[in-house]
Amino acid sequence: MTPVEEHEPTLSQEAATLHGPIPQRRSRLWATLRAVLRARVTAGLILVLPIWITYLLVKFIFDLMRDTSLWVVVSYLESHWGAPILERWGVTQEQVAQQGLAALDPKWQWIIAIVAVFLTIAFLYIVGVLSANFFGRRIVGAVESLLDRVPLVKTVYRACKQILETFAADKEQGFQRVVLVPFPTNDVRSVGFITGISRDSRTGEELATVFLATTPNPTTGYVFVLRRSDLIELDWSIEEAVKMVISGGVVTPPSMPFAGTPPAAVPPRPQPSSISRS
């Protein structure tokens, strides 16, 4: 082989030289397309997902309230009082008994569902009125006393009731203020909720009962009794603070007074003897 032949490029080398940059340009183009696609899909997901979750939640509540009283409406339609109504709708009681509400026109199905929801609301209102008087409280007390005798049921019932009472209570009875708690060290602040105010029986100093919620489930956490002077009270709403806890700090109000006078004492670390698990 001559020296000229040694330095002469082969056909495969020429092809590699000519087509080498093409895969690199394609990979860059594909990476750009993937980044744009991912950004657009993420933006669409952020827009659509909350709407979809809200729809599912509203639908769940509507179906629950409808199904609670739907049997009352169906029983009425299947009785001799409801026979004339079904005749005007062009349906017989036998068809309703066999096919259910599917035998009716969709318009009447929606009307029956709305009526069932209003019946559930009326039932809840009546229960609330009855529980506010003497005899109603006696009945509620008897039912709760019966539930307390069942080991598993009493734990679930009491926990659910306490959680609902906390979030449904008035401002003076539930969460009153949002505060920053010096926990677990002086240099760290945790978001808490003032649930009560009292005074030290010896010194007369104002104390605050603070519920420190955990992330992402704000229904569990710790209960502290702290000097109110050790807390940094915020002007946040309860809703803003709960959103911050649930999101793990992703949804945060634009500002907070983190800096301030160092607290005189730091609350102890969670211990079973000094901190109660909520």
Image (spheres, rainbow, N blue to C red):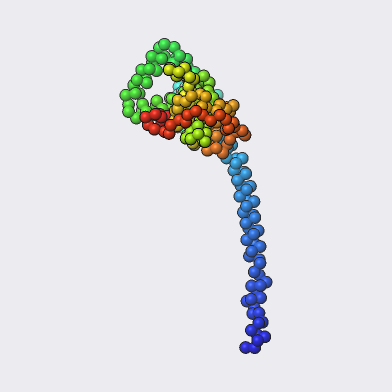
The answer to whether residue 133 is visible is: yes
Q: Classify the position of the C terminus by image quarter.
A: top left
Q: Nearer the viewer, residue 137 or 250?
A: 250
Q: Nearer the viewer, residue 3 or 39?
A: 3
In the rendered image, residue 269, in percent from the top left (x then y), is placed at: 43, 34
Q: Residue furthest top?
A: 134
> Which residue is rendered at x = 41% and y = 14% of the image?
136
In the rendered image, residue 31, in percent from the top left (x then y), is placed at: 62, 56
Residue 127, placed above or below residue 271 = above
> Which residue is rendered at x = 43% and y = 17% of the image?
201
Q: Residue furthest bottom?
A: 2
In the rendered image, residue 13, in percent from the top left (x then y), is placed at: 64, 76
Q: Nearer the viewer, residue 214 or 232?
A: 232
Report whether 273 appears left or right of 8.
left
> Which residue is rendered at x = 45% and y = 18% of the image?
203
Q: Classify the position of the N terminus by image quarter.
A: bottom right
In the rendered image, residue 267, in percent from the top left (x then y), is placed at: 45, 30
The answer to whether residue 97 is visible is: no
> Which residue is rendered at x = 58% and y = 35% of the image?
252
Q: How many marks?
A: 0
